[in-house]
Amino acid sequence: MTRTGPAEIVAVLLSLIALAVQLWRYDVVQDDAYITYVYARNLADGLGLVFNPGERVEGFTNFLWTLLLVPPHWLDLDAVLVSRAFAVAATIGVILLCWRLGRRFGGETRTGLWSTLAPLLLGANGALAFWTLSGLETALFVLTVTAGAAHYLWHGQRLLPATGGLFAIAAIARPEGAFFFGLTILHRTACGLLERIALPRLISELIRGGLPVFAFLGPLLLFRFLYYGYLVPNTFYAKTGVALTYLDHGLRYTEKFLVDYGLLGTGLIAPVLLLRRAPERFSYLALLLLSNAAYVILVGGDTLAENRLFLPVLPLMCLCLQEGAFTLWQQYPNRAVRLAISVLCVGAVVWTTTGSHGSLTHAVQAAAAHNDRLHNFVNYLEEEGLEPELLASTAVGIPRYHTNAIVLDLVGLTDTTIAHHPRSLPGIRDDHILRNYEIEYSLDRAPDLFLFIAGERPSTPAERALFLSRRFRRQYYTTYIEDRRPLLVRRHPAPAVKEQLFPDGAFIESYAQAIGEMDRGNEAAALALFEQSRRQAPHDFAGASDWIGRIHYRQQRFKAAIDALTEAVHRDDHTVMAHAYLAILEAENGRADRSLVLSERAVALAPRSQFCRYARGRCLVLAERWTEAVEELVRALHLVGSQSTGTIITGTGTRDTAAMIVDTLYLLGQAHVALGDVERARTAWVEALRGDPSHRGARLQLDRISGKR
């Protein structure tokens, strides 16, 4: 093997620097990591390896990673920070291991610099960095799979006990490690037969190589069966199935990986093209890469973004690309050709660094926003002094880790009944990988709260299917953590309702699609879909009428708005925004008493809604109840200031927070003047003009109190 030269060392250091840059760019923790933290903490606290106390469900697929995070909880360390430190160390190990394996491939014939293309590709890979800091086991799994494959290749494609030991660790890190070990056994068997190794000798080698796997996995499987009742994790049942949905998701997932990092498929076929150079070595790499791609397609890819399921074979793919480039370099000594090869290699590194930046940035922002919504919910519970006994959601990690509530996972990742005995309902599309649900079972458990993480749009089949239940429609109503973040709360006292499932979910599919159109700003399409939903819906479903009224209000069709909003309140007297908008309309029409009743009801149902407080304050101003108006308007401003900024959903499309603040300040100024506090009125109107210099009302009022005409 050639000696390590300065240029090679510099290139490896550059790969580590590139990794550091990518880690900085794509720094976010996944909510699913908190599921692991919950299991580790509960084990450390003596509650067992469970998610909810007393419920033995294996809702995780990273046994080794979970055990590694138990000591930090014993020592009262930050488990999130420790898990990320472990993962960074593992990723650095992957890059260095890939470099050393590439040098082994080169033997005595190559310059050392040619062993650094694969490390550079890994260091530049944003998905690897993204998942390194996710809090999950991905980096550890990549390291163990790469180490097992490297050991097999280093020793001439022989299955030694150490090889099996490394794959055993991979299998404990994630169950798919057993899949990669099975492929290794398959490859060694085929090679042994082709080499005409004596069958007893080959069997002996396979047994010795497989003993560590059986020694580790045997006790784990026994523990799993005795403790949880199943041989595979519960998540397997919750996520997998036989349907075209999975195939479609899997193909699109694979296509994205090949575009992002596979050089349009070159990465997967590179080992096939290199078979003539070293058949045993590259047939093994081809088997791992292509089998993993087939597996990903069949299981439907991943519910989480950015190529996670391809990362275990990513180092091996980068090695194949490196060997392919070096082979071409050797075969074509022409300077122009070699220059072109060098440019292509540099281009591959640059593309790896920048090609998926937009997608990764979006994934980071989406994950951060997702986490922010969950932390916001946790803060809401703390601030309001709420201690729900049971919370139901499709996002369960952060709520369970940061509260004492029992959490029901509506898609069954941490619930055996939903995972093993799902019940689909007519009209609900199964267009999501997490498509399992059991509505009657979920409602029988009587959750105190339902949290829809996507907002007012029910996104998963489990969320949409809830609306087919008469119990759900009549026992729960939508309040607001803040205007963009609804929460479904159990009514107290909850009325006794005999269950009856609506026979067709078409109405809720139209409703969910309509809210999606609202999010995209397409009000005309949304209105048509809401009208369709209203015609299809049961008589006690108010959502479509509510939104129709909000759209008409936004478009200044006030008579139509009143009709639709009144219908919404008639269908369900807990429809928050219908009360708030009707209150404003009634106040503008001079019916002060009616507006005050409606606005008081809206605030009672959703006390943290900025819009409801604003509507109440506006009605009080029009009723000339100035002191109460000041209190409500100040409260509205306080809620806007204490909660997230940006745009808020008021049901009439999106209303800019700044515009709402300006109108609130203008009304506040009017109330202060009526109370004789001119200076506070001046301050309010000056602030309103800062927010909107063209606000004519605030300008006129300031001129008036300044004695100007």
Image (spheres, helix red, strand yellow):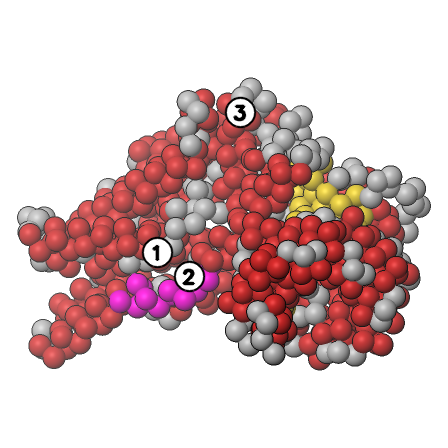
Residue at mark 3: 43
Instruction: Provide residue 420's location: percent of width, then percent of height.
Output: 70, 42
Report how far apart the C-alphas of labels 3 and 2 lie in the structure: 35 Å
Nearest to viewer (mark 3 / mark 2): 2
Q: Secondary structure at mark 2?
A: helix
Instruction: Provide residue 385's location: percent of width, then percent of height.
Output: 67, 34
Q: Residue at x 42, y 55 (%)?
A: 310
Tell which circle, 3 or 2, labels the residue nearer the N-terminal end: 3
Instruction: Provide residue 355's location: percent of width, then percent of height.
Output: 35, 68
Residue closest to the far top:
46
Report how far apart the C-alphas of labels 1 and 3 lie in the structure: 34 Å
Tell which circle, 1 or 2, labels the residue nearer the N-terminal end: 1
- How crowded is the residue under tag 3: few (<14 C-alpha within 10 Å), some, or many (20+)? many
- Give yes or no for contact between labels 1 and 2 (Cβ–Cβ under 8 Å): yes
Q: Which mark is residue 25?
A: 1
- Give yes or no for contact between labels 3 and 2 (Cβ–Cβ under 8 Å): no
Instruction: Provide residue 166's location: percent of width, then percent of height.
Output: 35, 36
The quadrant of the rendering that contains the C terminus is bottom right
Residue at mark 2: 361
Of residues 421 and 699, the one nearer the viewer is: 699
Image quadrant in which you'd find residue 75: top left
Q: Residue at x 41, y 66 (%)?
A: 358
Q: Main secondary structure of the magenta part?
A: helix
Residue closest to the far front:
707
Tell which circle, 1 or 3, labels the residue nearer the N-terminal end: 1
**Amino acid type shown at disc 1:** Arg
Q: Secondary structure at mark 1?
A: helix
Residue stretch rendered in magenta on the structure: 350-363
**Amino acid type shown at disc 3:** Leu
In screen coordinates, is 187 left or right of 371? left
In screen coordinates, is 180 left or right of 463? left
